[in-house]
Image (spheres, helix red, strand yellow):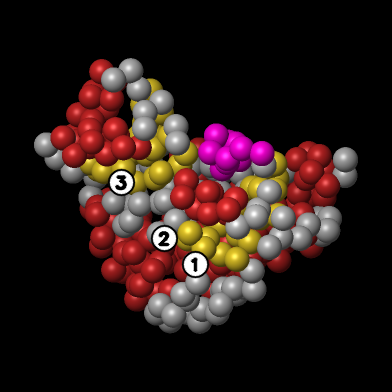
Amino acid sequence: MNIALFSGQGSQYSGMTKDLYEHDNSLSVIFDTASEITGRDIKDICFNADESVLGQTVNSQPAIMTASLVCLESAKRKGFEFSGVAGHSLGEYAAMVASGVVTMEDGFRLIKARAEAMDKAAKANKGSMAAVLKLSPEKIEEVCNSIDGYVVPVNYNSPQQTVIAGTVEAVAEATEEFSKLKARVVPLKVASAFHSELMESASKEFYETAKTITFKKPEIKYYSNVTGAELTDFSDMPSLLAKHIASPVLFTSELNAMKNDGFTDFYEFGPNKVLTGLVKKTLKDIRALNIENLKTLEEAFCS
């Protein structure tokens, strides 16, 4: 049974999905919709923007979502079918579009509001994030609780990787403690402490836009970062998505729930293969692969 996964922020790179578009120009409808709603030339950002431009939250979030939907549509044209969706952080918005929770147009309206609100909050609240490897989530929680300052685990990515976020000073202090424990710590190139209380102002601002959007029940299974399981209650999506901005991503729990529900084949759509790696580190006896360009598309469906 197939499930579609969608990439999160930080996976972007210049030139993403360019070869898919050149192979099939009809995919332009996704780029055009994204550009019209966000007021940015998303095709140009995906194909030509350098790292500094592409890394800006207001550019990276809609660009990654566009790339994810382009990759998915390319696979669907090869006959790909799926019975569930999940995304990592902003990837949940591509998942909502893919599962019919929102239209593509409303998906881009949501991601525009989310990116702008988070960009504003990041400029007002300086913070940082770091991935901690080779240490249990429980030990990471313990160390964070011991720090005199605000730092918390925010992305439970796999049994071997947890991302922390907080003030620059607290994250630096926690990093020193993790180093003493022989853990590997990798600073993330992000604008602030996403999925933490430093994003509370973004959560409130985004909620005002989310209230104007029509949400439907999905046509297939939809898994949530906030609950760490299949989401079955879609009665108040604006509140859930607003909470999502300032709450931890329970991705490890989600993956276990997917496998327990019978999913055996995990397809990641979007730039890079971060989620594919997390799936392989978390689950056994499954198939995981990424589709990000023409080469990986052909490998997945023409072999």
Q: Amino acid at mark 1?
A: Leu
Considering the whole magenta stretch, tell me its main secondary structure.
Answer: helix
Nearer-the-camera pick, 50 or 260: 260
Q: Secondary structure at mark 1?
A: loop
Q: Quadrant of residue 145?
A: top left
Give the mark toward the camera: 2 or 3.
2
Dot 3: what SS? loop
Whether residue 229 is visible to the viewer of this picture, yes or no, is yes
Q: Left or right: where does residue 50 sit relative to residue 68?
A: left
Q: Confirm or deny contact between disc 2 and disc 3 (CB under 8 A).
A: no
Asked whether the beta carbons under mark 2 and mark 1 sit within 8 Å of each other, the answer is: yes
Q: Position of residue 118 (x, y in %)?
A: 35, 57
Please give the name of the residue rendered at 67% of the width and 42% of the height, measured from the top-left corner. 286
Q: Secondary structure at mark 2?
A: loop
Q: How many marks?
A: 3
* Residue 135 part of the magenta-drawn span: no
* Residue pictured at 18% horizontal, 43% vertical: 150
Image quadrant where one finds the N terminus: bottom right
Q: Is residue 169 above or below residue 192?
A: above
> What is the C-alpha distance between the residues marked 2 and 1?
7 Å
Give the image location of residue 12, x and y in percent.
Answer: 55, 43
Res 280 quadrant in image:
top right
Q: Mark 2: which amino acid?
A: Thr
Q: Earlier in the sequence, mark 1 or mark 3?
A: 3
Q: Is residue 71 left or right of residue 102?
A: right
Magenta-highlighted residues = 272-285
Q: Is residue 53 visible?
A: no
* Residue 253 located left or right of residue 174: right
Image vertical order of residue 34 relative to residue 296, above or below: below
Residue placed under numbered mark 2 in the picture: 227
Whether residue 278 appears in magenta in the rendering, the answer is yes
Please give the name of the residue rendered at 31% of the width and 57% of the height, measured from the top-left corner: 246
